Image: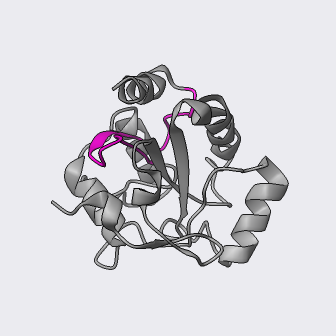
Amino acid sequence: MTDIQQIPLKTIQGADASLADYAGKVVLAVNVASKCGLTPQYEGLEKLYGGYKDKGLVVAGFPANDFAAQEPGSNEEIASFCTTNFGVDFPMFEKIVVTGPEKHPLYAALTSAQPEAQGDGAAFRERLTGYGITPNPEPEILWNFEKFVIAKDGTVAARFAPTTEPDDSALIAAIEAELAK
């Protein structure tokens, strides 16, 4: 398996980075989008980050335009949107591809390590189908705002469906369990 912490990334400002920058911390990696029905989750993600960052949690946002073109902006536009509308202070990374043959190596590693998401993914799949959208099969990312809990050592501890809210008790329990280690 690829060492997730060593995969090269770029911040939304274009600086070189990797999850190794957060070694010893728990990372919640989330593929995000600005024009999605789930976009209000940014507020909850920022609240989660604010409440747990001093305990060792990092929320990491990965903008992606893979689902219904719901993240069409440039990295600069995305950063401005997140700051202006949701006061996002957690680390944001450059726009990447999270599904399909061109997916970023980070998301290839995440989905390989945790092929199934916890939460109400089945109901969300039905909703997508009702809208005429063919949902991705597992292990692919289903939609925007899918969440991965990455342990302090870089292993992938849990995966949650897009509809899992940032204050969901199962997500909080998974984060707290990793923070306690």
In the rendered view, would you say 102 is above or below 169? Answer: below
Magenta segment: 146-167
Q: Is residue 60 left or right of residue 35?
A: left
- Residue at the image position 84 percent from the left and 57 percent from the top: 84
Q: Is residue 138 left or right of residue 70?
A: left
Q: Foreground: 36 or 48? A: 48
* Residue 155 magenta: yes
Is 95 on the left or on the right of 101, as rendered? Answer: right
Residue ID at (67%, 60%): 34
Figure quadrant of the C terminus: top left
- Residue 37 coordinates in the image, percent (x, y): 64, 49
Place of residue 144 in the rendered image (x, y in percent of width and height, measured from the top left): 51, 55
Examine the rendering and report whether any part of residue 46 can be seen: yes
Quarter of the rendering occupied by the N terminus: bottom left
Image point (70%, 68%), residue name? 78
Q: What residue lies at 62% left-to-right and 68% top-to-bottom?
A: 71
**Viewer-closest of 179 and 126:** 179
